[in-house]
Image: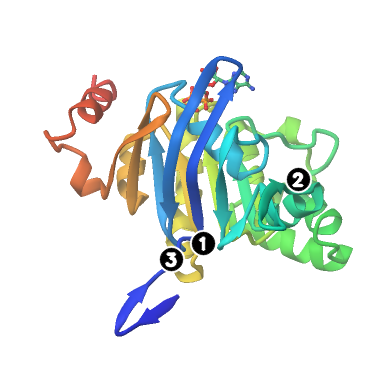
Amino acid sequence: MLIKKGVITIKPIIRYNKITKAYGDLKVLKGIDFEIYPGEKVALIGPSGSGKTTLARLLMTLEEPSSGTIEVEGKLLWHEKINGKLVRAKEKHLHEMRKDIGMVFQHFYLFPHMTVLNNVMEAPITVLGMSKKEAKKQAELMIKKVGLIDKLNIYPVQLSGGQKQRVAIARALVMKPKIMLFDEPTSALDPELVGEVLDVIKEIAVEGNDTDMTMLLITHEMDFAREIADRIVFFDEGVIVEQGSPDELFDNPKTPRLQTFLSRFNS
Ligand SMILES: Nc1ncnc2c1ncn2[C@@H]1O[C@H](COP(=O)(O)OP(=O)(O)OP(=O)(O)O)[C@@H](O)[C@H]1O
């Protein structure tokens, strides 16, 4: 945080600078300038195919931008400066930067041959070099947090979709990321299982206010977005169309494209 002449300036934890992404001729992101501040809970909403997942995957270093830069905590994510020139960063740099970012996907991607406990212990040991004993302790804490302490030794196949997603959340949280990305975490779930996952995310969002965890949540759950987000970002056709607090945006007749989009959820 910078304090200048009594004015407090908070630096963004994430900054997209003129980001574009194309797949062949398909221009998915068309010059995104976007900042997220430490501890902010941002909900990214918009029609299917508008580029929301791509925006998150660039940050998770799963996709590379076609042009532009991304900074995390003031450090370039995809690039390094060598002799004043921007060059693509080496894999080691990406690996280091990724440690601060956790991601929960629509499809849980648990390791099917590992128990719940081992799924959650894996990354602290292999990525952070944590001892087995400490990783087990941390993993158990996180599994307890998502309400699955009685499932430690069972395999993903024996879990419901909602439970699998809660394990995936524990697996991301155990790495103590500064930034958590959720990409439609409930879209693959049966309707009766959505609530338990949203409740866990809500709990993290509220706790995160103390720990300054920054959250970017891609969701089609409009009521949920309204409830937990500090800021809503409405994305369409590869550009940010509107952004503001839920109170500023929802029910605001001056945001016609957003209102048309939202009306689909009211029917
Ligand atoms: N690896 C890829 N190769 C080619 N096209 C891709 C690839 N990934 C995404 N796309 C295309 O990019 C566009 C944006 O996709 P993206 O998944 O980012 O949208 P989205 O807003 O997250 O959609 P949804 O809400 O349905 O998940 C889509 O047209 C998609 O088909």
Residue at image location 46% in from the left, 63% down from the top: 38
Query: Quadrant of the image for the N terminus?
Result: bottom left
Question: In the displayed image of the protein, which residue is found farthest to the bottom?
Answer: 5
Look at mark 3 in the image and give the residue it sits on. Answer: 209
In screen coordinates, is 67 left or right of 118?
A: left
The numbered mark, 3 or 2, whose residue comes first in the sequence reads 2
The percent coordinates of residue 185 (x first, y second) are 53, 36
Q: Residue 116 carries which label?
A: 2
Disc 1 element: loop
Instruction: Please tell me in which quadrant of the rendered image residue 232 appears.
Output: top left
In screen coordinates, is 94 left or right of 2?
A: right
Amino acid type, residue under disc 1 in the picture = Met
Amino acid type, residue under disc 3 in the picture = Asn
Q: Are marks 1 and 2 in contact (CB under 8 Å)?
A: no
Residue at image location 45% in from the left, 56% down from the top: 205
Look at mark 1 in the image and give the residue it sits on. Answer: 213
Residue at image location 35% in from the left, 81% down from the top: 4
